[in-house]
Image (tube, rainbow, N blue to C red):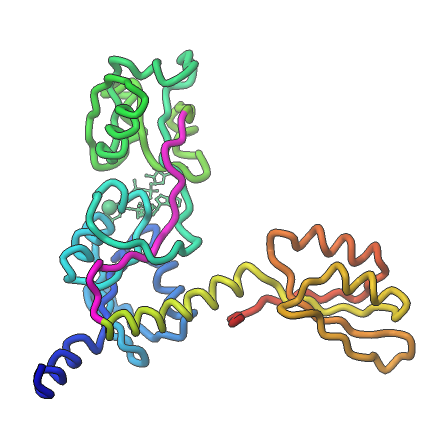
Amino acid sequence: MSTTNANNQSANNGILKIAIQKSGRLHDDSMKLLKECGIDVSNGVNKLKSEASNFPLEVFFLRDDDIPQYVEDAVADIGIVGENVVYEKKKKVDVVEKLGFGKCRLSIAVQKGDVYNDVSFLEGKRIATSYPVIVKDFLNEKGINAEIHEISGSVEIAPGIGLAQAICDLVSSGSTLFMNGLTEVETILQSQAILIKNTQLSAEQQAILNKLLFRIQAVKKAKNNKYVLLNAPNDQLEQIISLLPGMKSPTVLPLAEKGWSSVHSVISESTFWDIIEKLKAAGAQGILVVPIEKMIV
Ligand SMILES: Nc1ncnc2c1ncn2[C@@H]1O[C@H](COP(=O)(O)OP(=O)(O)OP(=O)(O)O)[C@@H](O)[C@H]1O
Ligand SMILES: O=P(O)(O)OC[C@H]1O[C@H](OP(=O)(O)OP(=O)(O)O)[C@H](O)[C@@H]1O
Ligand SMILES: [Mg+2]
């Protein structure tokens, strides 16, 4: 390749195009994630495209259903979309990272009062859904013959108006099912927002993605951990330190008051309350818990 061509190539590839949902459940969290990664993107009303001012990223605002196709076709290089949409669309894209928001499940529900013992209930029935591909795969796997009636929204209303005897739709709190007199009977898929990428990124695009990913992982780790500061009597230090993992090991500093130390450490969100109780029981006092903004290990 000549130098000129190489330069042109680099000009084309010097920016990464990301597709995110224009409006809806994933929009705000997707924008927030970019912001937490230190990337400034303006989000003007009715704007469909925006360029980050301080990172080589161009943002396309799209309907979530279209994102896997755009990423497969390299119209966008990467995208943020629910796993449910990725599995439904079955496009050729690579999954890069789970993002920890947009958590929901895709479930089958029937009318309250129906006697549902197992999936054989669905045999010969009509199921309303916006996810015909995933439902078809599920029924095939279970050896059930049922009619799939595809509708694009307000799926939970279908049994109540005589359109279907069962539905398959996204559930989070369960309140939409409850309000429509439905009961969840099978969970087909657990879903959350994920980062997907085109399968043939150039080396330069991959390098930008790696930079973005490094930041995303630091943000995610920080969210899953808390910084803890506490005072400990020196004669209890050994026991208290054994309860605290820290990134390497806890920091211990002497307090102005003799016989006491200040202990600093990082605790994971999942074990947080358990460890705090044990720390208190071991004699820790003045425990402060502080959120971490970024965490690079
Ligand atoms: N109740 C929920 N709780 C958490 N996440 C959800 C919930 N409902 C949907 N999601 C996730 O958010 C994604 C977008 O949901 P939304 O309802 O905004 O989609 P949509 O109406 O199809 O939007 P679009 O206009 O972009 O097509 C879903 O595909 C799913 O991954
Ligand atoms: O279990 P819940 O917490 O009630 O959430 C489930 C509802 O959320 C989603 O719809 P959304 O509210 O996004 O509206 P939509 O129909 O426009 O997609 C989904 O399609 C369900 O209807
Ligand atoms: Mg959609």
Considering depth in this image, is 265 or 10 the residue closer to the camera?
A: 10
Let me know if residue 196 is in the magenta part: yes
For residue 208, above or below residue 171:
below
Residue 74 % position (x, y): 16, 61
Q: Residue furthest front?
A: 1
Task: Characterize the magenta stretch by its predominant secondary structure.
Answer: strand
Residue 60 % position (x, y): 21, 64
Q: Quadrant of residue 163?
A: top left
Q: Residue at x 69, y 52 (%)?
A: 273
Residue 219 % position (x, y): 47, 66
Considering depth in this image, is 114 or 241 the residue closer to the camera?
A: 241
Residue 116 % position (x, y): 41, 15
For residue 85, above or below residue 231:
above
Looking at the rendered structure, the number of numbered marks drawn on it comes to 0
Give the side of residue 40 with respect to residue 101, left or right. left
Q: Quadrant of residue 290?
A: bottom right
Q: Residue at x 59, y 66 (%)?
A: 291
Let me know if residue 226 is in the magenta part: no
Give the side of residue 227 with respect to residue 67, left or right. right
Specify the segment rendered in magenta: 186-202
Considering depth in this image, is 228 or 31 the residue closer to the camera?
A: 228
Considering depth in this image, is 242 or 122 the residue closer to the camera?
A: 242
Name the quarter where the N terminus is drawn: bottom left
Q: Residue furthest bottom?
A: 3
Q: Residue at x 34, y 70 (%)?
A: 210
- Image quarter where ligand 2 lies: top left
For residue 245, above or below residue 251:
above
